[in-house]
Amino acid sequence: MSPHAASATIGRVTRSDRRLGVAGCLALAAASVILLSSCAAVTTASGPAGSSAPPTPTTPSEVAASLVTIDVPELAPYPDPSPPLTEAESEAKRVADADAQWQGLLSTYPNAVRPPDPFAGYLTEEERKEPLRACLEAAGVAIDEGRSLNPDDPPSIGWSTSTEAQTIAAFTCSATHPTKITRSGPNDAELGWIYDYMVAFFAPCYEANGIDVPPPPGREVWVETWPGYVWFPSYHEDPRFRDMTFELETAIREACPDPDTYLQAHPELH
């Protein structure tokens, strides 16, 4: 998931009960402070007097090597997902998504005239790349290829527009061959598990590596307003991760896996 990236992406519904327990939570060790009335040598957090602190990691490789992990607490089994969408529900979701995209276009071009529905069938994300590229190029839309830090990942197709005509054309190209939506998104129980995982492990693991994490909202608030109220621990504001490399990205994901990465690595929880 990246509830990130988390590119993923539930309408709000009325919820009457959001309490969901977990089998365990992260234990916090209380530190004791010993006051000494006298001592033979002054000590610091880095060790005895005269010793020097280890050098601060500066390069991506040094930062990757310095990352630590913490124990994952015992977690409840991952809740059952909602049933797959029916054909009618998938069609309704396609139409709703197209409507939302058009409303976004109208925020820039309020007098734009919407073309007839161009839908010509579903394609997978990989299958739609070439037809999408050809459609955009024919309309004179500038194409932006996105590339992952992993050199083995294929490029993604994006675009940028500068006129109303180009923006309408890009809308049409995207809506012609969308990917089929078969799931409605995480349900309340799944969201509760994700929140518990982030509070019990994900955020503390980032903090153990010196990454600032803002305090989370209440569990019910996070579940109720997702994805509108986004609290999700992130390293992107930390200057150590500014020059990101595939090695560093892999190291932080292995030390502190996000919920989606953790679930993929532990299918037994499902």
Image: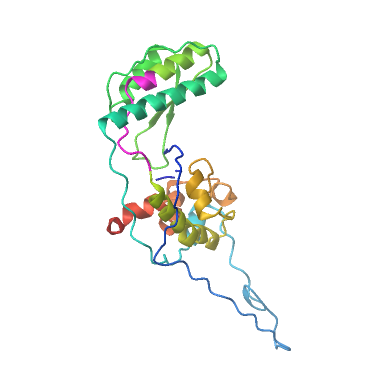
For the question of whether residue 248 can be seen, the reply is yes
Residue 180: say if magenta: yes
Which residue shows up at 32% across the image and 55% down it? 265
Which residue shows up at 46% across the image and 42% down it? 14
Q: In which quarter of the image is residue 20?
A: bottom left
Can you say whether 197 is above or below 245 in the image?
below
Viewer-closest of 230 and 242? 230
Q: Which segment did they paint magenta?
A: 173-185
Check the image and name the residue furthest to the front. 16
Q: Is residue 53 left or right of residue 28?
A: right
Can you say whether 30 is above or below 158 in the image?
below
Does the magenta stretch mainly form a helix, a strand or a loop?
loop
Q: In this view, does 183 lie to the left or right of 2?
A: left
Q: Is residue 268 left or right of residue 51?
A: left
Which residue shows up at 37% across the image and 32% down it? 155
Viewer-closest of 235 and 264? 264
Which residue shows up at 53% across the image and 52% down it? 59
For the question of whether residue 258 can be seen, the reply is no
